[in-house]
Image (cartoon, rainbow, N blue to C red):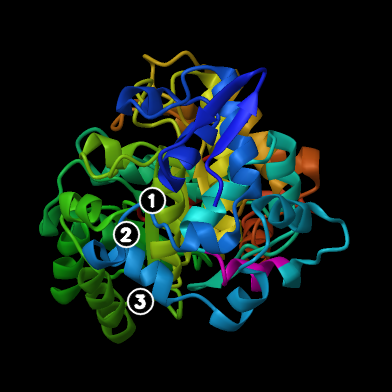
Amino acid sequence: MNLSATLSGKTYAFRDVKDVLAKASEEKSGDHLAGIAAERALERVAAKYVLSDLLVKDLRENPVVPYEDDEVTRINQDGLDEAKYAEIQNWTMAQLREYILDYKTTEADIRALGKALTAETVAGVCKLMTNLDLIYGANKVRIEATCNTTIGKRGHLSTRLQPNHSTDNVEGITASLFEGLSYGCGDALLGLNPVNDTVSSLAEVLKRFDEVKNRFEIPTQICVLGHITTQIEAVKRGAPCDMIFQSIAGSQKGNTAFGFSAATVEEAIALLRERGTAKGPDVMYFETGQGSELSSDAHYGADQVTMEARCYAFARQYHPFMVNTVVGFIGPEYLYDSKQVIRAGLEDHFMGKLSGIPMGCDCCYTNHMMADQNDIENLALLLGSAGVNYILGVPTSDDIMLNYQTNAYHDVNAVREILGLRPITEFERWLEKMGIMENGHLTARAGDPTIFTTRSNF
């Protein structure tokens, strides 16, 4: 295994596979913060050169967190398709990249391939791709999942309707919910980030979501994104719940910092299958974001792209309905500007698809980043082209509770119109019944929340 390369008369020697992966990453402020990034562009090129010649088995045999120390590594390693792995273990990373991008390689080929790749391998091949490569490679694959409805079918782009409120006032939440529905949002999920992570508060919002869903016979899913343990207790006390949410990390230490383990996820799934309100079988929702492991000192000296890929390896063990990267939420310490945010969004989506999970993206930024709404709209359109399962929608793109910016309710419809995409089929039929959409286009009634207030007691 060669870990050095000579470019322009200078030899670049890398300590180990972890160091190669870190130095081969496109520039990210989080990797600089961690002290592991390439110091200059030529060193990055040298690392990519070395990485391209490493074998698939080199990356499997050198996980960035040791097997004996970490359940994420164990879940990833123990869950591989060993027969498929035996076929590809001696491929170079360059060969792997070419295979994915070859026009003759089919969706079925890539899906089978992904089952034999560790997270480190997924991250490695990602680092050898341009943005267009990431879009083209991801677009070849669709990952479907079913909760009440089925997400991820080719030709569709869904939304998570996020009616967050600064005090969790149920009437304020309902007003935002009705506005979002009137714009054709919410086919992936009606999902709130709560201010108050208490059982009573979560249960109150879940009951309102359930009332709205049933009153208007909306074919969708509901979830309140509290801590996994709070949601479990709310369901035990009788709260209606289609799926359970948790933010995840790429290491056991990171997940411990988030306050859960693999056993907690298994408990949530078992509970929902017994007492949840969804048809299933896919009842988990995970969120990720590059840099979270560094913020909890749980990255083990690995770069943020590789740690992100490990999140997806963990997620696929539990067959989630949805996974999304909250790509610019943490701030400029990890993704400094729009170039880094857009690159990270495309990386995360590609890696999620290759890992075999139903991937969405919260195309977002914070006000202290070098990014603006134009950048996030660019990312949404690029991800739509890449075949992303869903994006988010909030009122006027401004989340007043989380204090960050993402896509507005109406943005998804612009992307759908440009790319010829539709909502989930059952949801589109419902929109037509409500007079909000006709023949795949919004009607003049779209954006009018009184569609719902005049037909109900809300």
Question: For this view, does 125 lie left or right of residue 178?
Answer: right
Specify which label sits upstream in the sequence, 1 or 3: 3
Q: Which residue is mark 3?
A: 277
Quadrant of res 131: top right
Question: For this view, does 415 lie left or right of residue 371?
Answer: right
Query: How many discs mark residues in the rendered view?
Result: 3
Q: Is residue 455 depicted above or below 49 in this figure?
A: below
Q: Which residues are magenta?
A: 110-117
Whether residues under marks 1 and 2 lie with C-beta atoms below 8 angstroms apart, the answer is yes
Q: Which residue is mark 1?
A: 287
Whether residues under marks 1 and 3 lie with C-beta atoms below 8 angstroms apart, the answer is no
Q: Nearer the viewer, mark 1 or mark 2?
A: 1
Report the front residue among 112 and 210. 112
Q: Which residue is mark 2?
A: 245
Count residues near mark 3 (Cα–Cα under 10 Å), then give few for <14, some for 14-19, many for 20+.
many
| Residue 142 is one of the magenta-drawn residues | no
* Helix, strand or loop status at disc 1: strand
| Residue 111 is one of the magenta-drawn residues | yes
* Helix, strand or loop status at disc 3: loop
Query: Marks 1/2: CA distance?
Result: 8 Å
Q: In the rendering, at what x and y percent does residue 240 appear?
A: 28, 70
Query: Marks 2/3: CA distance?
Result: 15 Å
For image coordinates 15% across by 60% down, the residue present is: 230
Count residues near mark 2 (Cα–Cα under 10 Å), then give few for <14, some for 14-19, many for 20+.
many
* Helix, strand or loop status at disc 2: strand
For image coordinates 32% across by 23% down, the residue present is: 33
For image coordinates 87% across by 56% down, the residue present is: 103
- Residue 387 disc label: none
Q: Is residue 130 visible?
A: yes
Q: Nearer the viewer, mark 1 or mark 3?
A: 1
